Image (cartoon, grey):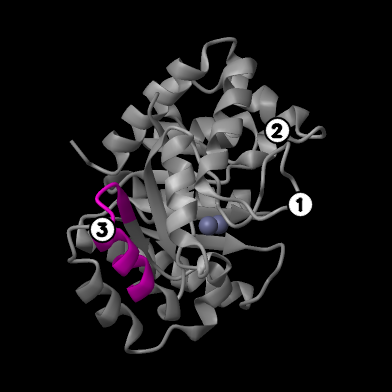
Amino acid sequence: MMLTDSHAHLEMPEFKKDLEAVIQRAKESGVEYVFTVGTEKKDWKRALEIAESHPSIYAILGVHPHNAKEIDYQTYPMLKELCRNEKVKAYGEIGLDFFRNFSPRDLQLTRFREQIGLAKELGLPVVIHDREAHHETLEILKSEGAKDCGGIIHCFSGDYGMAKACMDMGFYISIPGSITFKNAESLREVVKRIPLDSLLVETDAPFLTPEPFRGKRNEPGYVRYTAQRMAEVKNISLEKVAEVTTQNAMRVYRLD
Ligand SMILES: [Zn+2]
Ligand SMILES: [Zn+2]
């Protein structure tokens, strides 16, 4: 069985002490590929370093909506340079977070638009973060022509209509550990309706730990529990979920 964690944050300080053990446990759980996302300037080089020293780990770089206010004249030139590295497989995560609002909303909207443009220029798919901003996210993806670069809606939390609109633009829908939570019946209903060919699984480690480890630090090996729950929801085998979601990841991240 070969699983893929389409979205984790291995460069975050939570993994500083035991990263190699975490990676080893992922392999033992059947997780072959991990995509680690550097969300702000201080993390980009570390994310790349991890990807460069592990053959089946890849990097995704960009500025998270939380950090939109930190973007200055040096940011995009620096990202352009770093994204030339062949281990960088996507641009992100970018988007809108109207739940925490760590950066002003107006600025989030502007930086989101700019970064879709940058991803298109770099020829990379985009990884989208959308928290309590479904309408605006969809609006911007459409108006900025994100169809041209394609990508992933990570930690998907919208309804089926949102998923459908994103799939119509060629986007993949990535499902996090919250699918295992007791109160996630509506997410499970949406997952049931999304074709397996458009689905990915992710941990967003160290966050969003699935059951039965909820409350502890998340790590890529736990993507297995998310895939298992997806298999139950879709009434297919875990092996099938692993196989197809890995193929989907290879396709969207262009790893043939
Ligand atoms: Zn996110
Ligand atoms: Zn993330």
Q: Which mark is residue 120?
A: 3
Cα distance, mark 1 to mark 2?
A: 13 Å
Question: Would you call the spot at circle 3 few (<14 residues within 10 Å), some (14-19), or many (20 or more)?
Answer: some
Question: Would you call the spot at circle 1 few (<14 residues within 10 Å), some (14-19), or many (20 or more)?
Answer: few
* Along the viewing direction, whichever of 142 and 246 lies nearer the viewer: 246
Q: Which amino acid does label 2 sit on?
A: Thr
Q: Quadrant of the N terminus?
A: top left
Question: Along the polypeptide, which appears first: circle 3 or circle 1?
Answer: 3
* Along the viewing direction, whichever of 168 and 84 lies nearer the viewer: 84
Q: State the residue position of label 2.
A: 180
Q: Residue 215 carries which label?
A: 1
Q: Which of marks 3 and 2 is in front?
A: 2
Q: Does the magenta stretch include residue 250?
A: no
Question: Along the polypeptide, which appears first: circle 1 or circle 2?
Answer: 2
Q: What residue type is labelled 1?
A: Gly
Q: Main secondary structure of the magenta part?
A: helix
Point out the stretch of residues depicted in magenta: 45-58
Q: Do the residues labelled 3 and 1 touch (CB within 8 Å)?
A: no
User: Residue 122, percent across and down?
Assistant: 21, 62
At a point 63% along the width and 78% down the height, the residue shown is 104
The answer to whether the residue bearing label 2 lies less than 8 angstroms from the nearest atom of ligand 2 is no
Q: Quadrant of the C terminus?
A: top left
Q: Nearer the viewer, mark 1 or mark 2?
A: 1
